[in-house]
Amino acid sequence: MIRTQSLLKVVDNSGAKLVKCIKVKKKRGKSYAGIGDTVLVAVQSLRPRYGRRVKLKMNKSEVHHGVVVQTRRVYRNKSGSSQSFGSNSVALITPQLKPLGTRISAVLPSRLRGLKWAKLAAMAKKII
């Protein structure tokens, strides 16, 4: 479960490395986010860029939208199997719900495909 002030890893190649959750969006009274929920995040640290020609899509302390793709909380499927990840992670998106990065360097849950995030699932290196 992701609450405000939670630190999250960024799993795409948009340029950010670590972000902080500012607000959980569209949860109707709930103050936490799970897998597939949209959050508003602030960039805390950036990935190092190599060479002058590499142009970053963001700067430090900018505010962006993101989708929670991994949580440390155990999630149980209807079939009885459980699933959890090693860290809380997010993929950055635009306000029009399109991904900022072009690749996702993490394993994503198959639940994202059914939660209108099929584009993110297609960019991932593996889906479980």
Image (spheres, grey):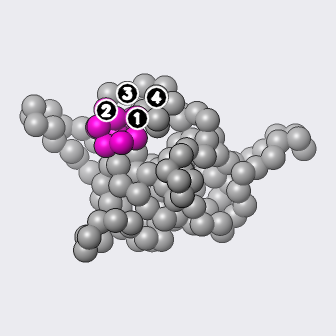
Q: Are marks 3 and 2 in contact (CB under 8 Å)?
A: yes
In the visual, does 50 lie left or right of 123? right
Residue 18 versus residue 125 in the image, above or below = below
User: Tag 4 or tag 3, which sits nearer the N-term?
Assistant: 4
Q: Tell me the residue that label 1 is attached to.
A: 118
- Taking the view exactly as shown, the residue that stands out farthest to the right is 52
Amino acid carrying label 3: it is: Ile
Which quadrant of the figure contains the C terminus? top left
Helix or strand or loop: what does disc 1 sit on?
A: helix
Q: Which residues are magenta?
A: 108-118
In the image, residue 1 lies at what x, y percent?
A: 30, 59
Front of the two marks 3 and 1: 1
The kind of residue on which mark 4 rests is: Ala
Q: Which sits in the foreground, 95 or 92?
A: 95
Question: Label 1: few (<14), some or many (≥20) within 10 Å?
Answer: few
Q: Amino acid at mark 2?
A: Ser
Q: Is residue 118 above or below residue 87?
A: above
Q: Give how far apart the Cα atoms at labels 4 and 1 are.
A: 6 Å
Contact flag, marks 4 and 1 (Cβ < 8 Å)? yes
